[in-house]
Image (cartoon, rainbow, N blue to C red):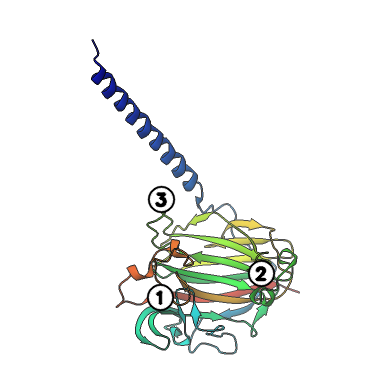
């Protein structure tokens, strides 16, 4: 005969089993959904530059070419750190954008990094744009190879990108993100932004591509073929994503940069309103080390006339 206490224990046990089962199913569903956002790079569609000619190339031999590149942008405060020109330099035939903590930096104590852009110096309309690089291996950093139009930079972009877009060819903010169930380390993605950065802002992005080589310790190539009708993105010479969203019809400049999670120069991760804190916390990295975004080259091809 089952007593009242036994029935009570059985109900409690059954309830716990149901809860555990529900949690397992929910976790599995989340995992499958998250995993579907990470894809391997197919080798079905290799890059074909037939009919195109090399119109620009920088292998970063010698000093940085100031006729092409600038290493400052607006004020030095950039999200959770500072963009200062001494953090961008050439060494051993590579462009280096170095992130490091400085106790007595020009802007005071904090994390310093850099940027390298061709705004007002070298701009292009349509073509194939490629960089060969290694991403910095540190939490809380967002390295990128991208393009931008003057209208987008000045928050004047309208018409769904026709008069300027932000074209993110390579973004790598995923070195270590413990807050996410699915690990995105060694993945990159592509994103298009249009119509400025205010209330009218619109964007779309690809899935996350699992690169077949270590993106932090090995060079990989990232490129985009931009035509009047679409963008076609490539990693290591193979197509990854194409979209006709926000196709710019005006000149765009090249941009290489590293950003730090945070805002107003503060990398304080306790402020949940800080930008990009989901990319990790820069303060988890040792302060006595430097973290380099290393770029071997930037190349631009356009269709031969």
**SS for dot 1:** strand
| Residue holding disc 2 | 196
Expressed as whole percent of the image width and height from the top left, the position of residue 164 reads 70, 71
Return the mark for residue 292. 1
Which residue is found at the position 47% from the left and 85% from the top?
A: 84
Expressed as whole percent of the image width and height from the top left, the position of residue 191 reads 59, 62
Spatial CA distance of label 2 from label 1 is: 30 Å
**SS for dot 2:** loop
Mark closest to the chain's N terminus, 1 or 3: 3
Quadrant where the C terminus sits is: bottom right
Quadrant where the N terminus sits is: top left
Return the mark for residue 181. 3
Task: Pick the residue in front: 9 or 196.
Answer: 9
Q: Is residue 50 above or below residue 14?
A: below
Which residue is found at the position 49% from the left and 85% from the top?
A: 61
Task: Pick the residue in front: 74 or 125.
Answer: 74
Give the quadrant of residue 81.
bottom left
């Amino acid at each position: 005969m089952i007593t009242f206490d036994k029935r009570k224990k059985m109900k409690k046990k059954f309830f716990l089993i149901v809860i555990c089962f529900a949690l397992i199913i929910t976790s599995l569903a989340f995992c499958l959904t998250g995993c579907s956002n990470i894809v391997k790079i197919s080798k079905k569609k290799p890059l074909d530059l037939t009919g195109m000619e090399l119109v620009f190339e920088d292998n970063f031999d010698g000093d940085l070419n100031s006729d092409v590149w600038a290493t400052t942008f607006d004020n030095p405060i950039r999200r959770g750190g500072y963009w200062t020109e001494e953090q961008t330099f050439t060494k051993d035939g590579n462009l280096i954008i170095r992130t490091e903590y400085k106790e007595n930096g020009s802007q005071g104590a904090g994390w310093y990094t850099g940027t390298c852009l061709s705004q007002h110096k070298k701009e292009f309309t349509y073509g194939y744009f490629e960089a060969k690089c290694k991403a910095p291996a540190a939490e809380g950093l967002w390295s990128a190879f991208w393009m931008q139009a003057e209208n987008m930079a000045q928050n004047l972009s309208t018409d769904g990108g026709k008069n300027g877009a932000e074209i993110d060819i390579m973004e790598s903010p995923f070195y270590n993100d413990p807050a996410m169930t699915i690990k995105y380390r060694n993945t990159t993605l592509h994103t298009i932004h249009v119509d400025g950065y205010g209330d009218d802002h619109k964007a779309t992005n690809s899935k996350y591509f699992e690169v077949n080589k270590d993106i932090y310790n090995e060079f990989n190539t990232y490129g985009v073929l931009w035509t009047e009708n679409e963008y076609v993105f490539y990693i290591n010479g193979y197509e990854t994503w194409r979209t006709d969203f926000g196709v710019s019809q005006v000149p765009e400049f090249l941009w290489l940069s590293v950003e730090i999670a945070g805002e107003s120069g503060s990398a304080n991760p306790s402020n949940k309103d800080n930008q990009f804190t989901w990319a990790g916390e820069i303060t988890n990295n040792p302060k006595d080390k430097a973290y380099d975004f290393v770029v071997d080259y930037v190349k631009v091809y356009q269709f031969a006339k």
